[in-house]
Amino acid sequence: MNKTLITFFTVLFCLTSSVGWSEVMDDLVKRDGLYYKKFSDVPFTGKVDGQTQGSFKNGKKDGLWLYYFNNGQLSFKGNIKNGKQEGSWVSYNEDGTKDSRNTVVYKDGKKISD
């Protein structure tokens, strides 16, 4: 029984510890329009963390993306769908206040309004 319990917890630890891992943009390379982990031929699916935060699906940016200034304040945020900017992108000042002059709306990666 003890061996079974130890094996169970070992497998559980391995599975749960790998789920929380994320990369940073410097861990990825872009080839032919897709992002890959360095030294891999499989398009990256997962999250990046750090000064640039977001998700990838099959090598393309997808979902909410956040970009930060060096001081840690949010610089801008917006959504990306299938590798293309989509919807409103909001800019912020280095002090953290919203920059009302720079909200841009995108449709399928093309700017449609300021």
Image (spheres, helix red, strand yellow):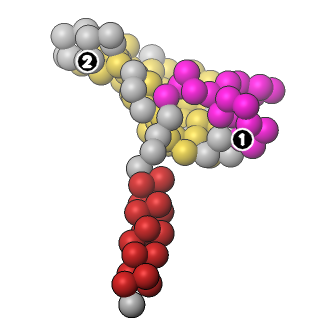
- The front one of 90 and 73 is 73
- Where does the image place residue 94, in percent across and percent down from the top left? 25, 9
Q: Which residues are magenta?
A: 24-43
Q: Is residue 65 magenta?
A: no
Residue located 19% across and 10% down the image: 95
Q: Is residue 35 magenta?
A: yes
- The front one of 96 and 48 is 48
Q: Amino acid at mark 1?
A: Pro
Confirm whether residue 112 shows in the render: no
Label placed on residue 43: 1
Confirm whether residue 1 shows in the render: yes
- The front one of 37 and 33 is 37
Q: Earlier in the sequence, mark 1 or mark 2?
A: 1
9 shown above or below 18: below
Label placed on residue 88: none
- Where does the image place residue 92, in percent across and percent down from the top left? 29, 16
- The front one of 10 and 56 is 10
Q: Amino acid at mark 2?
A: Gln
Position of the C terminus by quadrant: top left
Q: Residue furthest front?
A: 2
Position of the N terminus by quadrant: bottom left
In the structure shown, which secondary structural element does the residue marked by tag 1 occupy? loop
- Where does the image place residue 37, in percent across and percent down from the top left? 65, 34
Q: CA distance from mark 1 to mark 2?
A: 30 Å
Label placed on residue 73: 2
Q: Is residue 66 left or right of residue 98?
A: right
Q: Is residue 22 left or right of residue 108?
A: left
